[in-house]
Every structure is written in C-alpha cells, then in structure tokens.
Image (cartoon, rainbow, N blue to C red):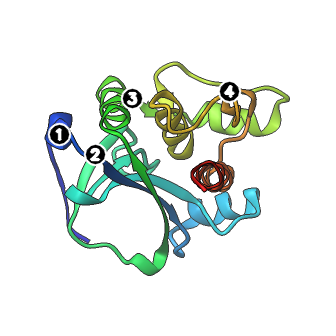
C-alpha cells in the first residue's frame, strides 16, 4: 500500500457538499488488532476518517507514527474495510479540518484507552487520542453527530465497535428526518 504525507487546505472544498466516509478495519492485521477484536467482541479493530475526493485518510494508529496525521492512500484493500458514507456541508467539513489542524501531531492515548476499560469512568489525556475516539469527537465538534441525541461525552468506551454503532444510529436518524 502506498502512502504519502500531504498538506491539506480545507478551503479546497468550499461551496459544495462533501462526502466523507468512516472506514472500519476488519482485516486480519496484527496482534493488536486481534486483541482489540477479542476485548470489544467486534469484527472491527480500527477506524479512520476518509475524504474520498482526495484519497485522504485521517486518524491515529498505535503502530504508525503514533500521532494524529493525514495520509494520501492511493491503494487500499477494500475487502479489509467497511465504509459508512456521510454527506456533510461545507461548514461541517471546515470544522473537521480545523479540528484536525488543532489536534494534528497529538499522540496515542494508551493510558486513557486502557484505563477506561477497567475503571468506572472515562480517562482522557488532553492531547492524546485513540482512533475511534478522535473520529467521534471530530464528528461531534463539526455537528455531524448531534450531542443531544448521541451523548458521546457520557461514554467511557469509544471503541471502533461503539463508533460503528453510533455512526450507524446517526445515519438512521438522519434518514428518518429526511423521509
């Protein structure tokens, strides 16, 4: 799989609707993927936010650089991923990009991810994230997830499986409203 670091200007999508995707990894992966799947009892072990128009994948992976980044992927084995499409406004897109710019380079939140699984409360380091948590916050801050309906702040677990459920629920609510 080819990847390259890329600079992003969120001005490039102004004045039109933008489709984003949330990509959920279900491939075999490595031992960490297997542990996440076992612990969360899910087929998903990782998530990324994708801007399909520019082949841009945003998020954080514990093994690759361990920081929030965006890469351009020319190739990807789509059989290893499930994608949920979401159409968003220019304003929502700009908010995602501003959140990305604000958090770019933040590290992986190993302590928060692990301790939140064993303690009765959410543990969160201000400048650290794990993959699905970062995406959930990007969607909430941009107004894509309505915090009044889907209260992510009240959840100590934001695993890829939980994010999948939240995004699926959000898409269903949006579809019901538009019907």
Residue 126: x, y in percent?
A: 52, 18
58 horizontally vs 108: left or right: left
Which of the two discs, 2 and 3, labels the residue nearer the N terminus? 2
Q: Nearer the viewer, residue 118 or 165?
A: 165
Which of the two discs, 2 and 1, labels the residue nearer the N terminus? 1
Q: Residues within 10 Å of mark 3 (few under 14, many from 20)?
A: some
Q: Which of 146 and 2 is in front in this view?
A: 146
Q: Which residue lies furthest to the right in this view?
A: 120
Report the residue marked by disc 2.
70
Report the residue marked by disc 1.
8
Q: Distance between the residues labelled 2 and 1?
A: 8 Å
Residue 105, can we see it? no
Q: Which of 32 and 132 is in front in this view?
A: 132
Which of the two discs, 4 and 3, labels the residue nearer the N terminus? 3
Please tell me whether mark 4 sits on a helix, a strand or a loop: helix
Quadrant in which the C terminus is drawn:
bottom right
Which of the two discs, 1 and 3, labels the residue nearer the N terminus? 1
Which of the two discs, 1 and 4, labels the residue nearer the N terminus? 1
Please tell me whether mark 2 sits on a helix, a strand or a loop: strand
Q: What residue appears at the point 74 percent right and 34 percent down from the top-left corner?
A: 155
Q: How far apart are marks 1 and 4 (CA)?
A: 28 Å
Of badges 2 and 1, the one in the foreground is: 1
137 horizontally vs 173: left or right: left
């Amino acid at each position: 799989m080819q990847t390259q670091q890329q600079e992003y200007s969120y001005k490039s999508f102004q004045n039109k609707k933008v489709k984003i995707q949330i990509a959920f990894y279900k491939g075999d992966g490595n031992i960490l993927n297997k542990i996440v799947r076992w612990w969360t009892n899910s087929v998903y072990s990782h998530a990324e936010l994708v801007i399909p128009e520019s082949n841009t994948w945003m998020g954080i992976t514990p093994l690759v650089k361990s920081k929030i980044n965006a890469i351009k992927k020319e190739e990807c084995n789509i059989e290893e991923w499930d994608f949920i499409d979401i159409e968003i406004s220019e304003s929502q897109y700009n908010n995602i990009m501003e959140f990305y710019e604000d958090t770019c380079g933040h590290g992986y939140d190993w302590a928060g991810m692990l301790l939140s699984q064993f303690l009765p409360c959410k543990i969160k380091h201000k400048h650290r994230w794990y993959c699905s948590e970062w995406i959930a916050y990007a969607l909430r801050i941009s107004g894509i997830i309505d915090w009044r309906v889907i209260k992510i702040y009240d959840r100590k677990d934001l695993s890829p499986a939980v994010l999948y459920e939240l995004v699926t629920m959000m898409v269903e609510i949006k579809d019901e409203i538009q019907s």
